[in-house]
Amino acid sequence: MVEDILCSARALQLVFLDEANKRMLMEEPIAREIEEMMRNPHFWNELEAINSLVKLVKAMAQEIGMEKPRVGQCLPLWEELRVKVKDWCSKFHIVEGPVEKVINRRFEKNYHPAWAAAFILDPLYLIRDSSRKYLPPFKFLTSEQEKDVDKLITRLVSREEAHIALMELMKWRTEGLDPVYAQAVQLKHRDPSTGKMKLANPQSSRLVWETYLTEFKLLGKVAVRLIFLHATSCGFKCNWSLLRWARSHSHSRLGMDRVQKLIFIAAHSKIERRDFSNDEDKDAELFDLDNEAFDEDIVRPARSP
């Protein structure tokens, strides 16, 4: 609708010059208000701004739908959106404060602790520091997100192994990855079909954890488990019979591991087939389950009230 109005701008301006329209303006106060509004250059600037913002968001959403990003890409994608919206504010002379509040509210509503953990554990996002080490990007996390990383990692290992997993995380934080391996993981080439830069080997993050970073026995298992979850897996729905079966196995870690593997395989099978169908209201989103025993053991740590 906004784009239609912009395309009709010239025609609307000509309408105001029509004699019949002038007579109507004399009789109708609302028509006069509309004319005054549309003669104001500020109105057209705001309309163009809205149209530009809609296109920006649609383009990002379309790209996400096509690329099926992994969970670790969620934080960088939100930061990319913030940067683009900031440029949009500057271009159209929009006050940034209220717009930032809207974005932050949407971010908080959608944020999942797995985003932060996968972002930290994926070698793809390691950053070279002044000593030429490739270290996890903790500096881009808030203090709450750092706590989420700790909680999620300890939740995905046994209680007895939790302190060991945190020690491995600290070592990962201070030592990072050998530069040769880090550069190999982050190597990109241009896709001839799209012209965009893409990873030369999308599986390299997994290979590094499984073949080189073997000293991180617990952290490596958590990393492989998290960083290859697709952010669009939330489009996969599971029915209540599966949930009831999952609940019956929630007391057993072995049982829960079986449940998680089945759901993971089913979700990725649907993604490969591009099948995102559901059973209408009998379904529940995988990442939004209310079942505490099921949900917490997969990816969501308990939060203090």
Image: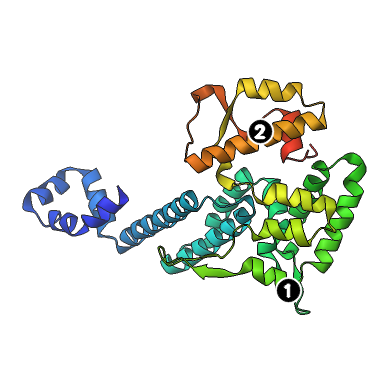
Most foreground residue, 9 or 233: 233
Given contact means CB atoms under 8 Å apart, are the residues at marks 2 and 1 in contact? Answer: no
Residue 76 marker: none
- For the residue marked with disc 1, what is the amino acid? Pro
Q: Is residue 234 left or right of residue 12?
A: right
Going by the picture, which residue comes out furthest to the front?
211
* Residue 79, placed above or below residue 287: below
> Image quarter for residue 292?
top right
Cα distance in 3D space between marks 2 and 1: 36 Å
Q: In the rendered image, which residue does mark 1 sit on?
A: 179
Number of numbered discs on residues? 2
- For the residue marked with disc 2, what is the amino acid? Leu
Q: Is residue 15 visible?
A: yes
x, y (%) of residue 297? 76, 36
Most foreground residue, 193 or 40: 193
x, y (%) of residue 7? 23, 56
Q: Residues within 10 Å of mark 1 (few under 14, many from 20)?
A: some
Q: Is residue 287 visible?
A: no
Label located before the other in sequence (2 or 1): 1
Q: Secondary structure at mark 1?
A: helix
Is the C terminus in the top left, top right, bottom left or bottom right quadrant? top right
Most foreground residue, 99 or 180: 180
- Residue drawn at 13 percent across, 53 percent down: 15
- Residue drawn at 38 percent across, 59 percent down: 52
Q: Is residue 199 left or right of residue 114?
A: left
- Residue drawn at 62 percent across, 34 percent down: 286
> Image quarter for residue 200?
bottom right
Q: In the rendered image, which residue does mark 2 sit on?
A: 262
Q: Secondary structure at mark 2?
A: helix
- Residue drawn at 46 percent across, 64 percent down: 88
